[in-house]
Amino acid sequence: MIYGIFGDIHSNFSALSSVLAEMKSCGVESYVCTGDVVGYASEPAECINALRAINCQVVAGNHDYGVVGKIDIGNFNSDAYDAVLWTMNFLSVEDKEFLSSLPLVLKKKDFTLVHGTLHNPGLFNYMVTYPEALKTFKILDTHVCFLGHTHMPAAILYKGGDIFLADLKDEESVDLAAWEKVIINTGSVGQPRDNNIDASYVIYDSEKSLVTFKRTSYNVNDTVEKIYTAGLPRRNGERLFYAG
């Protein structure tokens, strides 16, 4: 099976459209999203509808649950907080039901999917330390776990009790068979934070046991202008120009 795996769309429909078009050209057979469909940008409904149209399987991100009141957004930064409130007022009942129905964890035959960490997924912790990674590795019972949340693509590799980190670039691949377990951060479609403004995603070939990191450009100016026009915090648009 060829999977297209992506996340942290954050209501950036232009970026999502570019990613979906490129994944289709790569022969993707099944689409999977690591969460945070909404937040920050101005087209949440369009992004939700696009995922429905391709029968994408999605797990919940903190922004998704924040919009529907399933978590407290009091600890969100001010720009994220304002965007959540804006999104609450913008989405239809049907859109909110979609977000509310998203599970925290999705387990498939070939992989496990979560937004932040596999242990205590409802806390939406960031996987930025080796101890955090080790906790997820200890309970991971599939070969690979795909996640997002940090907006930074990476491969966290486990073998013989040791953990290795690989910051992979466009078109670089990970041979899963070479490792006991692997955690893949797919990066962000709609708001990268690794100093590369291009949308990030991965292609997972389960038969070849191969994950390939991908980047694709999109119309950043269009997204930024829509953010400004919507009255969302200007920083939500400005940071798209430098991906930091």
Image: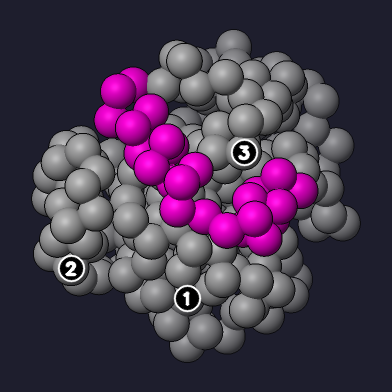
Provide the secondary structure element on which disc 1 rests: helix
- Give the extent of the magenta segment: 77-101
Cα distance in 3D space between marks 2 and 3: 27 Å
User: Could you say which is closer to the camera, residue 162 or residue 198?
Assistant: 198
Looking at the image, tell me whether mark 3 or mark 1 is earlier in sequence order. 1
215 in relation to 228, above or below? below
Numbered-mark total: 3
Residue 222 is tagged as 2
74 in relation to 183, above or below? above
Provide the secondary structure element on which disc 2 rests: helix
User: Disc 1 marks which amino acid?
Assistant: Leu
Q: Inspect this view and state whether residue 170 appears.
A: no
Residue identified by numbered label 1? 20
User: Disc 2 marks which amino acid?
Assistant: Asp
Looking at the image, tell me whether mark 2 or mark 3 is earlier in sequence order. 3
User: Could you say which is closer to the camera, residue 63 or residue 121?
Assistant: 63
The picture quadrant where one finds residue 5 is bottom right
